[in-house]
């Protein structure tokens, strides 16, 4: 156990890339409670999200979140929960509550972009940025800004996911202006991933290619996994 802890601490210090968990690390996870990844498919119910040429964002968000849930659940030591079980409307602040109630160690919200611009930028990974004002929606409960420690951890999670996507040859950017209510969990590292621009036919078309879809979700799952492995290495050092 000590040897493993030292290895994890060293891996963290050297910022080594951990593309998939080793058997040893999986065993260490399985000895304690599993790390819980909360997946938050955007929109739902009467909130359709963007609707472009017959493609409905809430359905795509849900399909991708389910795929991620499958992949994460296959990893020993990790469990995945969803903020909505089906096509239900869940207010944004309630999603934050659900993540906490589930004992989430990381929250990943899944969305698509709806931008009128021609150049595609691929996948965008947002973490909370204080300097942007959140437009309050009618009926939405306001939440305070998350503390700096949450923002720092969310930033690490965002970069880890980007690194993992790039290793799969998928273009991705980290954006620190995520003025989204779902990113306001006080203690859970939280990111919002936009998987493409719904107005970009080529970008969205790729999602219907099972190989691309598999690579995309696997890369995100591995990024989350790598982040949680580093976090447990940090905890082991203390
Ligand atoms: Zn959305």
Image: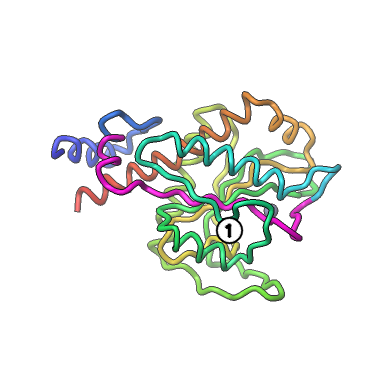
User: Tag count in the figure?
Assistant: 1
The percent position of residue 183, horizontal first and vertical second, equals 53, 60
Q: Quadrant of residue 10?
A: top left
Colour basis: rainbow
State yes or no: Cβ of the residue under disc 1 lies below 8 Å from any atom of ligand 1: no
Instruction: Give the residue drawn at x 40%, y 53%.
Output: 105
Quarter placement of the N terminus: top left
Which x, y percent locates residue 87?
69, 53
Q: Which residue occupies 44% across, 62% down?
A: 100
Specify the quadrant of the image occupied by residue 46.
bottom right
Q: Which residues are magenta?
A: 26-50
Q: Residue 167: x percent and y percent?
A: 49, 29
Q: Report the side of 201 relative to 7 (left or right).
A: right
| 36 falls in the magenta region | yes
Mark 1 lies on residue:
177
Q: Residue furthest left?
A: 2
Residue closer to the observer: 150 or 88:
88
Looking at the image, residue 147 sits to the left or right of residue 9; the answer is right
Secondary-structure class at tag 1: loop
Where does the image place residue 158, in percent across and percent down from the top left? 49, 47
- x 58%, y 29%: residue: 214
In the current view of this chain or complex, which residue is farthest to the top? 211
As drawn, is 4 to the left or to the right of 104? left
Figure quadrant of the C terminus: bottom left
* 91, above or below 190, in the image: below
The residue at 56%/35% (across/down) is: 217
139, 10: nearer the viewer: 139
231 inside magenta stretch: no
Few, some or many residues within 10 Å of mark 1 (<14, 14–19, 20+): some
Looking at the image, the residue that sits furthest to the right is 53
| Vertical placement of residue 179 versus 60, above or below | below
């Amino acid at each position: 156990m000590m040897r493993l802890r030292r290895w994890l601490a060293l891996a963290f210090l050297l910022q080594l890339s951990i593309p998939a968990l080793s058997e040893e690390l999986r065993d260490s996870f399985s000895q304690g409670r599993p790390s819980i990844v909360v997946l938050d498919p955007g929109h739902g119910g009467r909130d359709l999200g963007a609707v472009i040429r017959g493609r409905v964002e809430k359905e795509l968000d849900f399909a991708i979140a389910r795929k991620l849930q499958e992949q994460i659940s296959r990893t020993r030591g990790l469990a995945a929960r969803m903020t909505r079980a089906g096509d239900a409307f869940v207010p944004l602040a309630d999603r934050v509550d659900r993540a906490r109630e589930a004992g989430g160690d990381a929250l990943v919200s899944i969305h698509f972009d709806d931008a009128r611009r021609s150049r595609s930028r691929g996948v965008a990974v947002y973490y909370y940025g204080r300097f942007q004002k959140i437009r309050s929606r009618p009926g939405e409960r306001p939440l305070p800004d998350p503390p700096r420690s949450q923002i720092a951890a969310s930033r690490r999670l965002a970069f880890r996911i980007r690194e993992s996507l790039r290793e799969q040859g998928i273009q991705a950017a980290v954006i620190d202006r995520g003025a989204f209510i779902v990113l306001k969990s006080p203690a859970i590292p939280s990111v919002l991933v936009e998987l493409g621009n719904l107005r970009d036919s080529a970008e969205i078309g790729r999602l219907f290619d099972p190989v691309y879809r598999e690579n995309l979700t696997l890369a995100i799952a591995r990024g989350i996994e790598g982040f949680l492995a580093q976090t447990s290495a940090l905890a082991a050092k203390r």
